[in-house]
Image (cartoon, rainbow, N blue to C red):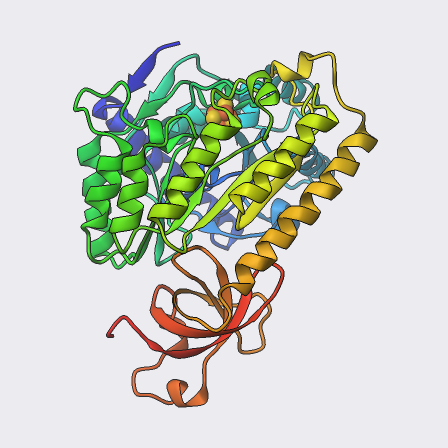
Amino acid sequence: MSIIRVDNSEKTEFDKAIEELKGYFSDLSKSKGRPATYNLLTYGCQLNESDSEKLAGMLQSMGLEKIEGSGELAAADVVVMNTCSVRENADKHLFGNLGVFKSFRSSGENSIIAVCGCMMKVPENVEKIRRSYPYVNLVFDPQQLHRFPILLRDAVSMHKRSVSICGEDYIAEDSYFPIERERKFRALVPIMYGCNNFCTYCIVPYARGRERSRSFSEIMKELEDLASKGYREVMLLGQNVNSYGKGNDDGKTFADILEEASKISEFSRIRFMSSHPKDLSDRVIDIMADRPNVEKHLHLALQSGSDVVLKRMNRPYTAEGYLRIADYFRERVKGGSLTTDIIVGFPGETEEDFVKTLEVCSRAAFDAAFTFQYSIRPGTKAAEFPDQIPADVVTERFGRLTELTNSLTEQSCKRLVGRKEEILIEGISKAGGGVYSGRTITNHLVNFTIPDEIKAQAGFCEDSLEGRLCSVDIQYARPYSVDGVMERFTDGK
Ligand code: SF4
């Protein structure tokens, strides 16, 4: 499989396709007597969310207006489903939603339906769509995001289904796309795509292709631009950000990106996701410790505390190696938070292996853990392993693990009580009732109230709280979050 860097040779065609679709949807809008609309459903991780911000940017450039929610599916003129093959039951969601259109078709509704994302790299899924969902107009894989307008135009103008799954791994710079960012203060910035690790349970290397990194100078240009537009938080994304730069010829590493980004003073928070223990360097941890606007939060997937299971997972580190990184992080990043992912019930996992996972969790004192019960992902090596663990054993172990990790999370929250923490405000809390939410630099979720005397101050505006910094007096710990009262803004505005 080859890696192809997308240059501007297709850009003229890309822009032309957008213009042609703009004309098509303008006519459609006139004939319907209302704006033409799109509905974009996104499943999965932040990389998929980032792809969806580009899809949204392209759809809006075609003159389409956004409508939201799976209940509104048939009301949209264009429906795009950006799928994920990592999350459990992703296939049920996709095929359930596609099934909904059967009845709409028979009642005369005629949305253009496009399906993309990782699931389209699994041949069985594409075949199922070909066979059972004849009304799907376009299928394409995540490697071809930069071709979406061209593929959509061709599918629309030829009135026939188009399935475009390619064998190459493309990499396009963000500047190639119009991007409609979901948040006004936080920007998702992919720095690399794909993965070379082939963990035996994971479909990503097959779905997203080989590792390929964006250009360092293009990333820095994008970050400067985001800062000038008022973004206060950036999330640097990749399946394995710490192997950024391999294959590029300028010698730049992830640590270089993090260090340079941290010099952009407009950014209050610089976050990154995901890290692999085999590639994380001490220099990255040193930068986290030394640069005030780099988040003091490391998410580092452990997956198992047993060396035997790690080997079967094709994760080339040991539990001791992982703990060495954890210790260095705790020593250098004082008060930082360490979170992880753990899979329970991987094929062949014995009770002894599982107990080792519990022991590593206690020793690492994780601030939070995302725990998963192993389930077979078709197309992966582990799906073929003979020693799958019975479901009741997996469930029982999962219960013991979550009991431990929940108690570690609660302890982590309790440690914040009585402290004044600087919070980056994310907006009104889901709980409502005059409560706002935000995050500490350690990524702890804080729900807080704002006293009336602050609300009465000149210049206070509820609508422009997102992205502002404030100090909060933390008063109460919940199992996964803390509550507090705002003291003052700290960003000098
Ligand atoms: S590092 Fe492993 S788990 Fe993560 S994306 Fe790559 S193959 Fe999947």
Residue situated in front as seen by the camera: 126 or 242: 242
Which of the 4 quarters of the picture holds residue 96?
top right
Residue situated in front as seen by the camera: 150 or 483: 483
Which of the 4 quarters of the picture holds residue 108?
top right
Residue 406 rendering spot, x and y as whole percentages: 64, 52
**In the displayed image of the protein, which residue is found farthest to the right?**
392
Residue situated in front as seen by the camera: 412 or 247: 412
Residue 194 rendering spot, x and y as whole percentages: 41, 24
Q: How many marks?
A: 0
Residue 286, above or below 472: above
Please tell me which residue is depicted at 26% across the width and 36% down the height of the picture. Answer: 255
Residue 147 rendering spot, x and y as whole percentages: 37, 26
Please tell me which residue is depicted at 41% across the width and 36% down the height of the picture. Answer: 325
The quadrant in which the C terminus is found is: bottom left
The quadrant in which the N terminus is found is: top left
Residue 341, above or below 427: above
Please tell me which residue is depicted at 80% across the width and 31% down the height of the picture. Answer: 393
Left or right for 424, reference 78: left
Residue 290 rendering spot, x and y as whole percentages: 25, 50
Please tell me which residue is depicted at 27% across the width and 29% down the height of the picture. Answer: 214
Residue 414 appearing in the image: yes
Which of the 4 quarters of the picture holds residue 227?
bottom left
Residue 4, above or below 424: above
Residue 107 appearing in the image: no
Residue situated in front as seen by the camera: 369 or 191: 369
